[in-house]
Amino acid sequence: MASRTSSWTLLLVALALSLTGCRCGDDSGTGDARQGFRPQETEVDFGRALEGSLTRRQVTLLATGRASLTVTASSGAPFSVASAEVTVPGSGTTVVEVDFLAANGPAEGTLTLTGAGRTETVRLTGLGVRPLTCVPSSPCHESSFDLATGTCIERALEDGATCIPTSRCVVNGRCESGACVGSPRTCDDDNPCTVDACSPSQGCVTAPVVCPTPSNRCKVGVCDRDEGCQEVDAEDFIPCGPGDCKSARLCFNGSCDEFATPDGIVCAPATACRGEGTCQDGECERPDAGELEAEFSQQLGGEPVGAPALLVQDGALFSSVCDEDAGCRLVSFTQSGLLRFESPYPDGGARTLLAASDAGVVVAAPEGLESYAPRTPGARQWEASWTSLGAPSDAGPWLGHVEAGQVALTAAGDVVAHVAWGPVPEDGGAVAVPESTRWVWLAGREDAGTVLRAGPVEAWRGEARLALDAEEAAFRYTVDGRLERADFERDGGSLLISELADGGVPGGSASLAVAGGTLFVGTRAFVSTDGGAPVTVDWDAGSRTLTPLAEPALLSSAGNPGYVFARSCSRTDGLPCAPDEERTVLRAVDSTTGLVAWEVDALPFEEVPGSFHDATLIEGDAVGVLADAERTDGRQVWLQFFARGKKVEMCALPGRPTRVAGSTFSGGRLLVVLERDGVWRVEAYGMGGIQASPFGWPQRHGSSSGVRREAR
């Protein structure tokens, strides 16, 4: 019986255990103590935030057990956590605060959460927005950046709000219906000797009253605060009439009388190489002319190639040079002589400068035309092969032919060219006489280097020159006497070529200039740009033999007069002049009659041999001439100025240059490429306030940049 009772007891215990479960080893103080957590969010988007602002979001952590636990939180920039540790209460929640420091652009990151032996992650995203600079349209509006739309939103200020008027002639500004209004500023200074006014940008401005000029040259008008304008005696001994260093009409005690000219009176202005002249003992004495002082003298880095040796465009200097070590390249200097860049030519071969604009520096290359960027580093921009310009592609190798006088640039940088070519000689030399020629018009910017339009391929007719007038009509003269004009329709198509001048201009040299509606053709005739009969230049007057120089031929902005140079030989026995017997003369020619207005010897010294180099028109109807003279100690180069048939000044360049490759005139400076002691240099010289003319056809190729375009 006892045994049966024991068995039932054991069975009941086992049943109880199976129903309630075994809690062996549990801490009676904690109950169910399982630990764990999970984030409620899997991704947090901070949205759009201004650059530099801090945005905070929360991530909720849920406990998955009845025991509390510690969770560590971390994140990388631009995200960060406010607290590196948080406690999640058992069966409860807590939050992790996350900050977003916005930059400019999208950002992504990860929030890492670690606790109870497990790691959870939350993806973080945000977009930083750089605000626009919002400027109100008027003083009575305010403008602010709207983050949601990414735009500036403007609103009008309330009426009566203070504002700052846009004009400094208005004070006490206030807003009315979105406009800033106020009271006029008072500028009267109560001084009758001033003219008072108000400038919208400067406020009150004053200027002295200009009193009427008295009829008596020895009186001057002055303003007195109490009496207004009055006439008083001019300063004693100022000129009031014609005079020289012998006698002069001078003011004294308010009257103009004749006096013996006092010593010290200025009789000649200062120039680039000498001080002003003064009267001494009845004569105008001028100090001896010194040598010009170079503003800079910079090594060129090689020997210049071709002509022109130097171009100047927008203050930058360009030259094409070669040397044995560095090959051939385009070099550029600043207007103060500092090296801007050296751009080697792709094959190391020589290139010849043609013209320059802000679209590029155009050069003649062995394979065609090329353009190089006028800015650092001077890389090649485009090339146009002789084949693309019209040379045959299936008749063997060809050599092209183009010179500086056969390329012109439009204001937009397009290239107008007279190109020619011929077959490569059997000996591999240059083309002596080309076979064919053609007008071409190339794009200078968009689709640069492509042929926009072209004339027909023609047989070679001899050397030619191009020129563009101020309206960019193109003209071409060839030495067989033909003068042509090329026009084109703006929407494309071929060039429309028409002949000008009745009967042409036969016997001329390769020379062409244009200004004021007049063409100076072949140094032989003047022709209207609209055509008509030529006005022939009289070269046969006198007993001397004159041989015109093809270039430079110059035209003032009005188209009259024209200036041309010629070699002169005074022999009358029929024999040719020896080189030391030849002179170079400068002629001014009336373009309406063809007659000589004046003529002058253009070399530095009479009876001393010399050579002419270059010339330019000078403001004030004068001509600047660069020439040299053979001195006993070597050749010296001189800058001379001529006006109305007289030499008014001459200044020597320093030292004894051995060779002059070329020069150009830019503003008030002469720029020259020359060789000194075996080293080629580019040098700049001031002209003492004298300015090269910026209008008409002032230099050999129209301008210092060689664009062969009339300037207005």
Image (cartoon, rainbow, N blue to C red):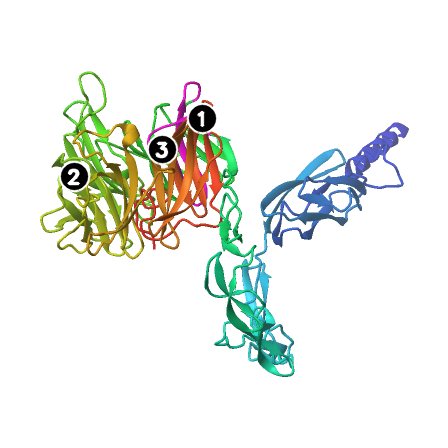
Quarter of the figure with the N terminus: top right
Distance from Cα at disc 2 to Cα at disc 3: 33 Å
From where the camera sits, is residue 60 visible? no
Residue 541 percent location from the top left of the image: 18, 46
Residue at 21% from the left image edge and 31% from the top image edge: 387
Q: Is residue 280 above or below residue 177?
A: above
- Residue at disc 2, secondary structure: loop
Identify the magenta region: 300-326
Distance from Cα at disc 1 to Cα at disc 2: 41 Å
Q: Amino acid at mark 3?
A: Val
Residue 533 percent location from the top left of the image: 13, 54
Distance from Cα at disc 3 to Cα at disc 1: 13 Å
Quarter where residue 434 is shown: top left
Marks 2 and 3: which is nearer the front?
A: 3
Q: Amino acid at mark 1?
A: Asp
Q: Which mark is residue 633?
A: 1
**First along the sequence among labels 3 and 1:** 3
Q: Which mark is residue 608?
A: 3
- Residue at disc 1, secondary structure: loop
Q: Is residue 1 above or below residue 643?
A: above
Residue 346 percent location from the top left of the image: 37, 26
Q: Residues within 10 Å of mark 3 (few under 14, many from 20)?
A: some
From where the camera sits, is residue 318 visible? yes
Q: Is residue 656 above or below residue 194?
A: above
Does 223 sit left or right of 96 as displayed?
left
Q: Residues within 10 Å of mark 2 (few under 14, many from 20)?
A: many
